[in-house]
Image (cartoon, rainbow, N blue to C red):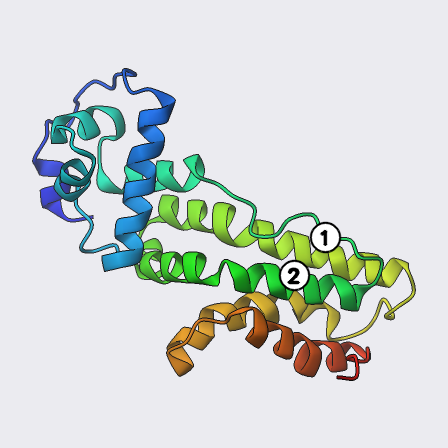
Amino acid sequence: MSPQEVAQEPAHTPRRSKITPERAQEFYAAVLDMLRESGYEALTMEGVAARTRCGKSTLYRQWGSKPELVVAALHGTRQALLPHIDTGSLAGDLREAARSIGAGSGRDTPLVHALSHAALQSPELLCALREVLIAPGLAAIDAMVRRGVERGEIRPDNPAAEFVSAQLLGVMRARPLLEGKNADEAYLTRFVENAILPSLGLSAPAH
C-alpha cells in the first residue's frame, strides 16, 4: 500500500453504510476488472471512483483504503471455482473439473496474477486471495480424490493423490507464464488425461 493511498483522506474517517448492495457490486466489479486489466499497483481509489462515477471520498468513507476495498471486492463477488461435480468416477470428476476450470481461466488467472505479489506483502489480502480464489478449488478437488479412494479406484496410500489439486490448479496459473497462453479447457483436459490420471494409475480414454 502506497502512502498516497492512505494519506489523501483523514486516517479516522468514520465509516458509513449508505451504499446499497447493488451499488457495492458495481464497485466490486470495477475493482476486479481494473485489476485484471492493469494489475494491483496501477489500481487507485481515484481510478475506481472515475470508472464508477462516484466521489473518491465515498470510497474512503466506506472502505478506508485500497487493500480493504480489494478484500471486500474478493469476498463480495465470491463465486465457486468449481460447481459440485460427482460423475461417479474419479477420472470423470477430474475431466469435468478440467473443463470447468479451463472455462474460467481467462477470468480467474489474470486476477490471481495481479494480486499475487501484493498479497505476499499484505496478510489480509493474502488471506482473502486464498480463501476466495484458491482454497475452494483445492477443497473441491481433494474431495473428488477422497471419493475415488472410498470407491476403491485408487489406493489410500497412492503417493500421487495428495498432489492432484496442486497439479491441476498450479498448471492453470503456470501456463500463462511459461507459454503466454491461458490453460483452457482443451489444455487442462489433456493435462488430466496425460499427466494426472497416469500418475494415479488410472487410464485415459482411447480417442
**Which residue is at 78% across, 53% downward?**
86
Q: Amino acid at mark 1?
A: Ile
Q: Which residue is mark 2?
A: 97
Residue 104 in picture, x, y percent from top left? 50, 58
Q: Which residue is mark 1?
A: 85
Comes first in the chain, label 1 or label 2: 1
Q: Secondary structure at mark 2?
A: helix
**Which residue is at 29% across, 20% downward?**
19
Q: Amino acid at mark 2?
A: Ala
Residue 69 in picture, x, y percent from top left? 29, 37
Q: Which label was assigned to residue 142?
A: none
Residue 178 in picture, x, y percent from top left? 41, 81
Q: Label 2: few (<14), some or many (≥20) within 10 Å?
A: many
**Which residue is at 33% across, 38% downward?**
28
Position of residue 183 relative to residue 81, above or below, is below
**Which residue is at 33% across, 47% downward?**
32
- Which quadrant holds the C terminus? bottom right
Drawn side of residue 152 relative to residue 181, left or right: right
Q: Label 1: few (<14), some or many (≥20) within 10 Å?
A: some
Q: Quadrant of residue 18?
A: top left
Q: Nearer the viewer, residue 27 or 119?
A: 27
